[in-house]
Image: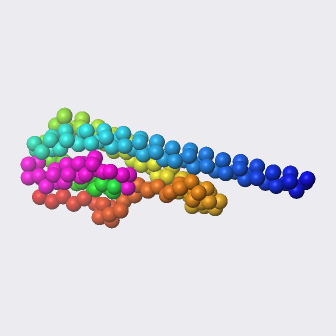
Amino acid sequence: MIALIVIIAIIAVLAIWLISSYNGFITLRNKTEEAYSAMDVSLKKRYDLIPNYVETVKGYAKHEAGTLEKVVSARNMAMGASDPEERLANENVLTGALRSLFAVAEAYPDLKANQNFIQLQDQLQRIEEEIAGSRRYYNGVVNKYNTKAEMFPGNIVAGIFKFTRKPLYEISDEAERENVKVSF
């Protein structure tokens, strides 16, 4: 009789642990999706603002067509991404292209004095700060999720219920870490 009670208690503890662990994964997965969504909203704002910014710079920097085309192309690639991994990789390319565009804009005093340009640049700067914050939040939540999915005993529950590793937002191209060079 005591053995039966002990077995039932062990099964109950295991069931409670399994339910708790499963619910923890669901919570972290939902937070990961929320973080990605928040980042996506900021990226959408940036996608909408970039054409205006490019058009304003285009009027002043006609011989910088290559830089402007790279920005537009990178924007289109990022918008057309089909999954989070591709989206994160394309966002790295867009960020690098925007850094080049910012450097070009700095080289034109008349452009920097244009009120429309100043407003666009301020908006884009605020959006870039939002994106940076949402990327940090996304990476933090994904890190918690991935850690739980890989550590024992969470890896058992992750394996049973197919909770797979999520991608972190990181710079994959070392060239993006270098300063942008502008020469005329």
- Which residue is depicted at the point 44% across and 56% down? 168
Q: Quadrant of the C terminus?
A: bottom left
Q: Nearer the viewer, residue 4 or 128?
A: 4
Does residue 95 appear in this view? no
| Percent x, y of residue 105 | 19, 48
37 vs 163: above or below: above
Q: Nearer the viewer, residue 144 or 115?
A: 144
Main SS, magenta region, reads helix
Does residue 150 appear in this view? yes
- Which residue is depicted at the point 36% across and 59% down? 171
- Which residue is depicted at the point 61% across and 49% down? 22
| Percent x, y of residue 11 | 76, 53
| Percent x, y of residue 62 | 8, 48
Q: Is residue 74 magenta?
A: yes
Q: Which residues are magenta?
A: 61-85
Left or right: where does residue 19 sit relative to residue 116? right
Q: Residue furthest right?
A: 1
| Percent x, y of residue 142 | 49, 52
Left or right: where does residue 131 sit relative to residue 159? left
- Which residue is depicted at the point 15% across and 52% down? 69
